[in-house]
Amino acid sequence: MKTYRFDTEPLKMYGLVRFGQDRLLQRIPDELIASMPSLEFLGRRCPGARLEFKTDAPEFKLRLTLKTLSVDVGMALTAVQSLAVFAGPHSSSRFLGLTRPGDYEHFSCEAIFKKGPGLENIQVWLPRNELIESVELETAEDAIVTQPDPYRYEKPVVFYGSSITEGGCSSGTYNCYNALISRWLDTDYLNFGFSAAAKGEPEMADFLREIPMSVFVYDYDHNAPTPEHLQATHEPFFLRFREKQPDTPVIMLTRPFGRFTDNDDTKKRRDIIAATYERAQARGDKNVRFIDARDYFSEADREIALMDTCHPNDLGFYRMAERICPVIREFLESRS
């Protein structure tokens, strides 16, 4: 048998912006974590990360070893502490199954996947919630393992925002709205959602604006503790980003909400974000768009699209993706 670690060629890691330099399973570098202590744990989680390769092995094994493992009251082991495996082209891949812990006591697990003969692209979605020690692929000695198919759009779409951006509370890392958009459009993406910890900090703006990207999706409304905080940070963050990326398309989102959270607080926040957008337009910025969360869910089913009064479930994420995807597609196609 042959064994490949996550950090060895020809396997390729997507969704971790510094992986090519440091080979670490974390979303942001240590120097940024040092300046933003709230991201000491969250910055080392890997939502949106995908390990990819091609193989002709009719079956293969994937082994996962976690550093941490804890209960999430909103999502199951299968949703956020497992490897999710897909085969085939990005935009039409089929689900092969999970490598998942059996409980919250054992940090290592493995599973065998059967796909049939023939060389196919394999996409392995890393867990959202935990720090990861290692991922390993095992194949027969004579199996071909080579580099994966490239994305149609290799320059990533970058998402910045809240726990919703990070994937809460979908039933799998591959079902949150940005993951759906990535699959539908065959585009790479980077997930910088931080549960309760993305608050429009200038340090994060300085980090994100250095990343080559195709589109920036800007969505931290839920994490701003008050409308006053959002007012003080939303436009300054955007302008700081624009200093280095004057022409990058930026899509500004407001937060999803239930019927009983469509209140004065929500409306104030919506107006603040809309004002950032409108002032950008008034300055002649043609690469900005505004999407209001009122457009995500119909009135008839608004509650069943949410897991609580805040986080979308799979239906909610699907509806979000349906609304946001055409705007991203417009920008990608206009620049390809």
Image (cartoon, rainbow, N blue to C red):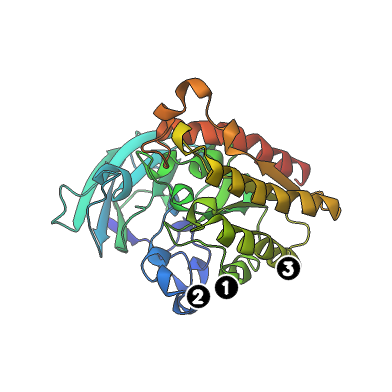
Query: Which residue carries the number 2 mark?
Result: 32
Query: Which residue sits at x=78%, y=57%?
Result: 247
Q: Dot 3, crowdedness within 10 Å: few (<14), some or many (≥20)? A: some
- The mark nearer the N terminus, 1 or 2, is 2
Q: Nearer the viewer, residue 15 or 324?
A: 324
Name the disc covering residue 273, or none.
none
Residue 294 picture quarter: top right
Dots 1 and 2: beta carbons under 8 Å?
yes
Q: Nearer the viewer, residue 104 or 236?
A: 236
Compared with 305, 179 (above or below) is below
- The mark nearer the N terminus, 2 or 3, is 2
Pick the quarter of the image with the C terminus: top right
Q: Secondary structure at mark 2?
A: helix
Total residue callouts = 3
Compared with 184, 276 (above or below) is below
Please, what is the three-letter code of the amino acid marked with disc 3?
A: Lys
Nearest-to-viewer mark from 1 and 2: 1
Please, what is the three-letter code of the amino acid marked with disc 1?
A: Glu
Q: Nearer the viewer, residue 236 or 262?
A: 262
Query: Which residue sits at x=52%, y=57%?
Result: 226
Nearest-to-viewer mark from 3 and 1: 1
Q: Position of residue 332 (x, y in %)?
A: 70, 44
Query: Which residue sits at x=56%, y=68%?
Result: 201
Pick the quarter of the image with the N terminus: bottom left
Q: Secondary structure at mark 1?
A: helix
Name the disc covering residue 203, or none.
1
Compared with 236, 63 (above or below) is above
Query: Which residue sits at x=46%, y=23%?
Result: 301
Q: Position of residue 300 (x, y in %)?
A: 48, 20
109 sits to left or right of 269: left
